[in-house]
Amino acid sequence: SLPRGESQLSLDEVKRALLLFQDQRQERSPRAEAGERASYLWLGATMLAEGKLSEAVEYIGLSERLCREAGDPAGALLACIHLSVALFVSGRFTQCLAGIERGMQDARSTCRRESELFLLFLAARTSFQLGAHEECAGTLEKGLCLAQLYSIRRAIPVLRAWRGRAALY
């Protein structure tokens, strides 16, 4: 329902799922714990879609923490990606860079190449927003190398365009 723009319906569905998984958590079921972590993530993603940035950061951050405590690097990566985007959109660039760094480590450890490249691009964009244009260009150059190495060709035009923009400053 969220992709169709029905954020309130999505919010209601995610809240119901969260309550269901929290009720089951009393049994210490791994399925219920994973469901609770995912519910916090999607609750935060729904808040992000609605522009409720502080709530989004809170719920997504909780999901990341629970994923790390549970030893779930794939879940932590997904949470870091969403958290970094929420922090970027809200202008909290220093915290965004910290989330990106954690996510990059998770992406490398789980061999999620597209996620690693996305986070690298977000790091470059964050550097650009902070006025660190040389750092941005260097990060984009690294991204271009990774896109070539990983054969993620659709990312190359975007990375080149932003490299050109960074070079203008």
Image (cartoon, grey):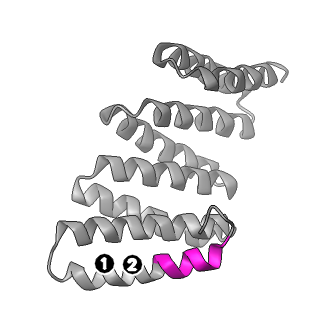
Q: Where residue 106 sits in the image (x, y, percent)?
A: 36, 40
State the extent of the magenta-drawn residues as a range: 6-14
What number is the disc on residue 18?
Answer: 2
Camera-side residue: 134 or 57?
57
Residue 124 higher or lower than 32, as above or below: above
Residue drawn at (22%, 67%) of the image: 31
Task: Name the amino acid, label 2.
Answer: Leu
Q: Where residue 160 sits in the image (x, y, percent)?
A: 71, 19
Residue 111 higher or lower than 57, as above or below: above
Residue pointed to by mark 1: 21
The quadrant where residue 131 appears: top right
Q: What secondary structure characterizes most of the magenta part?
A: helix
Residue drawn at (62%, 64%) of the image: 48
Residues under labels 1 and 2: Cα distance?
5 Å
Work out which residue is located at the far right of the displayed protein and give it: 168
Residue 77 higher or lower than 144, as above or below: below
In the rendered image, which quarter contains the N terminus?
Answer: bottom right
Answer with left or right where residue 126 lies relative to residue 103: right
**Is the Cβ of the residue at disc 1 closer than 8 Å to that at disc 2?**
yes
The quadrant where residue 11 appears: bottom right
Where disc 2 sits, the SS reads helix
Q: Where residue 42 sits in the image (x, y, percent)?
A: 48, 66
Q: Is residue 10 magenta?
A: yes
Residue 120 in view (yes/no)? yes
Residue 91 in view (yes/no)? no
Where disc 1 sits, the SS reads helix
Residue drawn at (30%, 34%) of the image: 109
Q: Where residue 24 sits in the image (x, y, percent)?
A: 23, 81
Q: Is residue 75 magenta?
A: no
Answer with left or right where residue 13 lies relative to residue 138: left
